[in-house]
Amino acid sequence: MADFGISAGQVVAVVWDKSSPVGALKDLVEKLQALTGSEGRVSVENIDQLLQSAHQESSFDVILSGLVPGSTTLHSAEILAEMARILRPGGCLFLKEPVETAVVNNSKVKTASKLCSALTLSGLVEVKELQREALSPEEKQSAQGHLGHQSDSLLSVQITGRKPNFEVGSSSQLKLSVAKKPPPSVKPAVDPAAVKLWTLSANDMEDESTDLIDSDELLDPEDLKKPDPASLRAPACGEGKKRKACKNCTCGLAEELEKEKSREQMSSQPKSACGNCYLGDAFRCASCPYLGMPAFKPGEQVLLSDSNLHDA
């Protein structure tokens, strides 16, 4: 019993189930009461009623579960989480449970590694296996009768875990060392040599020791020649039998084609012999192609039907 580290004045909980022999449970409680003394307390809880007991958090220094000799207790995730909740910060949980040496499908019995993982997920730290031994004849009989599980690979393991020195869900303000920025009025120090290096005054322009580069000297004679407009056109612009400017043309071909189109339209319009065709029939001659048509604005394109052209 000294291996559990129980001392006088501590509050201990003993968790048992239906597989625990009554006599063995009584002997265990009496030994614990002798260790805790009159200032301590030993509480006995049935594992099936633990969730309904409504213990306050941080109620026990030590919890012993499944440690009644001859018992085969299985611990669910909910039970482990409840035990972690009612443990005081820094308190320890000791449990004993039958485990399988290999993973068995559809089995309620876990492996030792899965049992340790379940303790860790419940919020405990420093989880480790203390002891592993074969089941006694009484424990094998209890596993068959209470768990309905029969296997030659069952072992009994004893595992412990400790609750951290804080409550689950507690928060604490972090103290971060952040360097304070200087006030806006305080300007950073500037190297005088760097200031002099990057400062060019009017006096420096007249200083013979200061070498200034003429930007015109950086140009070659080829750079001063006016480029040929044809060389500025895109390779695909104006290609083919029918000249056509490319989309978003910037080489001037689009403007050139537009001017050619305007000239063609002007040349295709019938020419007036007297220059008064647009004024109306009162001013038109007998052979005017616009005879019988209303007056129109000078330069306005007027479409003539084939019959009008033939009559003319």
Image: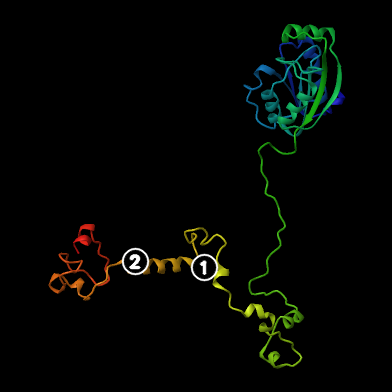
Along the viewing direction, whichever of 70 and 249 lies nearer the viewer: 249
Q: Which residue is mark 1?
A: 251
The circle on residue 227 is: none
Residue pictured at 71% horizontal, 80% vertical? 198
Considering only vertical position in the picture, is 229 above or below 177?
below
**Mark 2 or mark 1, which has the lower sequence index?**
1
Considering only vertical position in the picture, is 201 above or below 89?
below
Q: Quadrant of residue 139?
A: top right
Q: Amino acid at mark 2?
A: Gln
Residue pictured at 74% horizontal, 88% vertical? 210
* Mark 1 crowdedness (10 Å alpha carbons): few <14, some 14-19, many ≥20: some
Q: Which residue is mark 2?
A: 265
Q: Looking at the picture, how far across and down is residue 75, in whole percent?
A: 72, 20
Q: Secondary structure at mark 1?
A: loop
- Looking at the image, is mark 2 or mark 1 nearer the viewer? 2
Quarter of the image for the N terminus: give it: top right
* Mark 2 crowdedness (10 Å alpha carbons): few <14, some 14-19, many ≥20: few
Q: Looking at the picture, how far across and down is residue 151, in whole percent?
A: 79, 9
Q: Looking at the picture, how far across and down is residue 70, in whole percent?
A: 80, 11
Q: Quadrant of residue 294?
A: bottom left
Left or right, 193 with reference to 219: right
